[in-house]
Amino acid sequence: MAQLFGVFAKHSPESCPLNNATNKEVFSKLDKRMEQAMEKNGVKKIVGFFFSVLEHEWTIIVEAENAHGIENLCIESGISAFNTVKIVPLTDFKVAFDKIRGSQH
């Protein structure tokens, strides 16, 4: 069953695609490589992909079967080539809220 995960990637200013020609090349192919790696790694959908350019941080919200598939996606697409990546399972606010409220009764 697919669930939501947050993928948090961070790189140094020196390795930023804006400042590093090698990583700029990797970044230029990122969308195509991600698309190719998604299905075979059980990543169903990219819900959102956001950048904090001056912080050199990426936040990607994905729907996937498990964290191992996301790990493979990050490797195969090149995200992990110049980023440190953290993968975190996410729970919708309403689901967590209902669970907490239900445990009070």
Image (tube, rainbow, N blue to C red):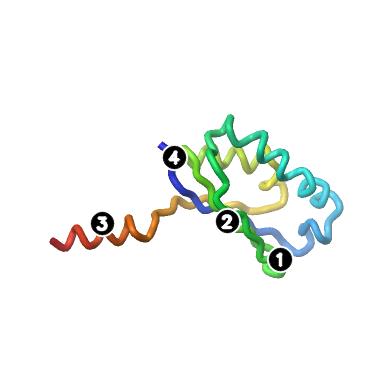
Q: Is residue 77 left or right of residue 29?
A: left
As shown in the figure, which amino acid type bears the numbered disc 4?
A: Ala
Q: Earlier in the sequence, mark 1 or mark 3?
A: 1
Q: Is residue 76 visible?
A: yes
Kindly report which numbered mark, 4 or 2, lies closer to the viewer in this rendering: 4
Instruction: State the SS at label 1.
Output: helix
Residue holding disc 4: 2
Question: Residue at label 2?
Answer: 8
Q: Residue 53 carries which label?
A: 1
Q: Where is residue 55 in the image (x, y as percent from the top left)?
A: 67, 68
Which quarter of the rendering shows the C terminus?
bottom left
Of the numbered discs 3 and 4, the one sitting upstream in the chain is 4
Q: Mark 2: which amino acid?
A: Phe
Q: Viewer-nearest of labels 4 and 1?
A: 4
Comes first in the chain, label 4 or label 2 = 4
Do labels 3 and 4 touch, CB within 8 Å?
no
54 relative to 103, above or below: below
Q: What residue is disc 3 on?
A: 99
Element type at mark 3:
helix
* In this view, the mark in front (2 or 3): 3
Q: In this view, does 88 lie to the left or right of 96?
A: right
Q: Distance between the residues labelled 3 and 4?
A: 19 Å
Q: How far is disc 4 from disc 2 in space, using C-alphas?
A: 19 Å
Secondary structure state at the residue bearing disc 4: loop
Please state the horizontal and vertical placement of residue 51, each as a whole percent of the image.
66, 61
Q: Nearer the viewer, mark 2 or mark 1?
A: 1
Please state the horizontal and vertical placement of residue 88, each as a whole percent of the image: 48, 52
Q: For the residue marked with disc 1, what is the amino acid?
A: Val
Seen in the image, is 33 located left or right of residue 22?
left
